[in-house]
Image (spheres, grey):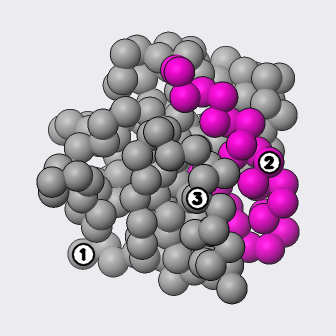
Amino acid sequence: MKKTVYDFKAKDIKGNEVSLEQFKGKTLMIVNTASACGFTPQYEELQRIYKEYGPKGLEILAFPCNQFGHQEKGSNEEIAQFCNLRFNATFPLFEKIEVNGDNAHPLYQFLKDSLPGLLGSKQIKWNFTKFIVDSNGKPTKRYAPQAKPLDIIKEIEFMLK
């Protein structure tokens, strides 16, 4: 049975398998993203936070997903290009995945089981749901899509202490 996020692997945006164990000892923000969503401007805040807190031990792991309003239609290459050109994103981007349903990525099954949403729902409701994971790989907090990354900076600072 998988006990931490370090027990999982995922493919990066270029298709290379990445063991999440490489992020051991870091605080993580794991977020499902989309390029054509009303919340897409959050990429800008994610990058600002990553630039400031990355050197202090924060990693932001972005998982594009097309399950909500078909707002992530592009190929992995197009997604990477969009994030680089529009937001100069330097945090790790992963391959497009599913976060709900039978084909949900195992990492997201684990996150949802660890931190159910409102009223115990294990579904991800929309793009830009954020999970904070402590430096031991344990999910600690789940934030709704409406929670802007800068709104949760105090939580991140606390986790980095």
**For residue 139, which quarter of the picture?**
bottom left
Does the image show residue 71? yes
**Is 44 located above or below residue 68 in the figure?**
below
Q: Which residue is mark 3?
A: 152
Q: Residues within 10 Å of mark 2 (few under 14, many from 20)?
A: some
Residue 125, percent across and down?
A: 30, 37
Residue 76, percent across and down?
A: 60, 25
**Is 20 located above or below residue 38 in the figure?**
below
Q: Amino acid at mark 2?
A: Arg
**Is 103 located above or below residue 134 in the figure?**
above
- First of labels 2, 3 by sequence position: 2
Residue 102 relative to residue 56: left or right: left
Q: Which residue is mark 1?
A: 1
Judging from the image, what secondary structure is the residue with disc 3 in? helix
What separation in Å lies between label 2 and label 3 (alpha carbons)? Answer: 13 Å
Residue 77 relative to residue 70: left or right: right
Q: Amino acid at mark 1?
A: Met
Which residue corresponds to the image point at 58% horizontal and 69% vertical from the top-left? 155
Q: Nearer the viewer, residue 54 or 21?
A: 54
Q: Which residues are magenta?
A: 37-61
Q: Which residue is mark 2?
A: 48
